Amino acid sequence: MRFTVIIQDPFKQTEQTHSSLSGEEAGQLFQQIDWAQLEKAVYDRLEEVVHHFYFYEISQEANGEKRTLTISPGLLPEDDMPATRPAYMVRYEYPHPTKPGKYLDYVHQQCDYAFAEQTVKAFVQGDRQFFNDRFETPRNKNLGRRSSVKKLLKVLLVLVLAMLLFIQFVIGWSHVPEHLASLRMWVFPQSFENAEADEAEAAIASAEAAANNITDVATSAPEVLLDTVMWKAAIERGDFIPDGVKEEYERARRFDHTRLQPATDRPTSEEAQEAILHYYKERVGNLLKDNNATIRIGKAYNAPLQVGDSNGGEIARVTAMVCAFNKKGDNLGNIQMPLDIAYDFVQYANDPGTWYLADLSQTIPYDYVLMKGR
């Protein structure tokens, strides 16, 4: 059997393609890559990264059917430095068993090196049973669970249709508003006591707005942009994409990153956690304690100082993503509310050595280094 290996280096524009390799040669290419050193280089030279999604891909084609194994490395960071324990995304793509020309795939996230190496070895040896046990069977089980959910949704849909038919032929659509109004009046009689006064106030407010020619203009709130790497792969695979995601994806792709200035004066992970705990107190303190977790801060960008005289005025403001990691190095994201995924951190003239929490003031890109392995 002959294999094709494609390697995407994070610092190079084009992929390296190695064709017609033996199984031994293909395996050696995987083993020759110093994954830990590569990830450290990405962290140290982030501004030079051309491809955030870099990988080792091996494929083999026989009888018109192609099988592909893709391994993308990452490291679980500790504090502000990369860890020494790599984590790998392993994706296996194989022919659909009943639909010629169609392909299925299954992905394992945060695998260790031993598993990644084992998959490469099994691939070059043509061990189909390994991939059936580790990839195809788990995928089928997931599809079975999804099928159960779909059946439940169908039952709910039938119930909704039955209710609509009941309204149409028994009650009549024209009477529905009357029945709802009567029900609301019976359950919430207090809300109808001043209904006429409320309508009058609304009419007056509308008239005043028209007289003053007041027009509200919607502006986009600051946010963290979409993870374009993940959604690009999902779109290319033909996965289900929720409403609005493609628009957000295109907006993230067009976002002008050059207008953002990386901050050199920024809080450490410990200072960011202190600022968050000072603001939320036990609400987030208990959350971190229950999950045995600490806060880490990602890449920070300078933000415009806000005008005001509080605490002598602002002397520094930066925007950055944050997330929680447990003691095992697992990325917990923002765990749950009220902890958010990004904040502004501010220093004041009256207390220049302390960072304080503030609302997000600008849109920033998704932090792939901080969220690696999520």
Image (cartoon, grey):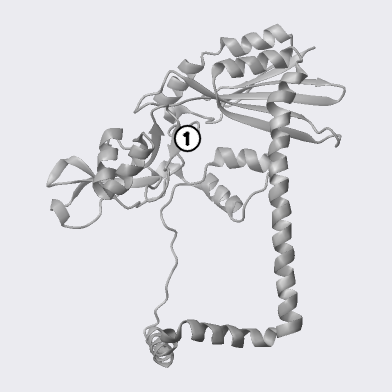
Residue at 42%, 43% (x, y): give it. 334
Mark yes or no: residue 68 visible. no
Image location of residue 48, percent across then percent down: 45, 27
Q: Is residue 251 above or below residue 370?
A: below
Residue at 76%, 20% (x, y): give it. 129
Mark yes or no: residue 137 visible. yes
Residue at 36%, 34% (x, y): give it. 292
Viewed as shown, does residue 11 lie left or right of 141? left
Residue at 71%, 24% (x, y): give it. 133
Viewer-proximal residue, 52 or 176?
Answer: 176
Image location of residue 265, percent across then percent down: 26, 36
Q: Quadrant of the N terminus?
A: top right
Q: Is residue 133 above or below residue 363?
A: above
Q: Amino acid at mark 1?
A: Tyr
Viewed as shown, does residue 146 lie left or right of 318? right
Viewed as shown, does residue 349 lie left or right of 189? left
Viewed as shown, does residue 240 lie left or right of 292? right
Image location of residue 277, percent across then percent down: 27, 44
Q: Which element type, helix, strand or loop, lies under badge 1?
A: loop
Q: Is residue 69 above or below residue 279?
A: above
Q: Is residue 329 above or below residue 274?
A: above
Viewer-proximal residue, 183 or 339?
Answer: 183
- How crowded pointer 1 is (Cα within 10 Å; few <14, some 14-19, many 20+) is rated as some
Which quadrant of the structure image shows residue 244?
bottom right
Which quadrant of the structure image shows residue 209?
bottom left
Q: Which residue is mark 1?
A: 368
Q: Residue furthest top?
A: 24
Viewer-proximal residue, 94 or 346?
Answer: 94
Image location of residue 365, percent across then percent down: 45, 43
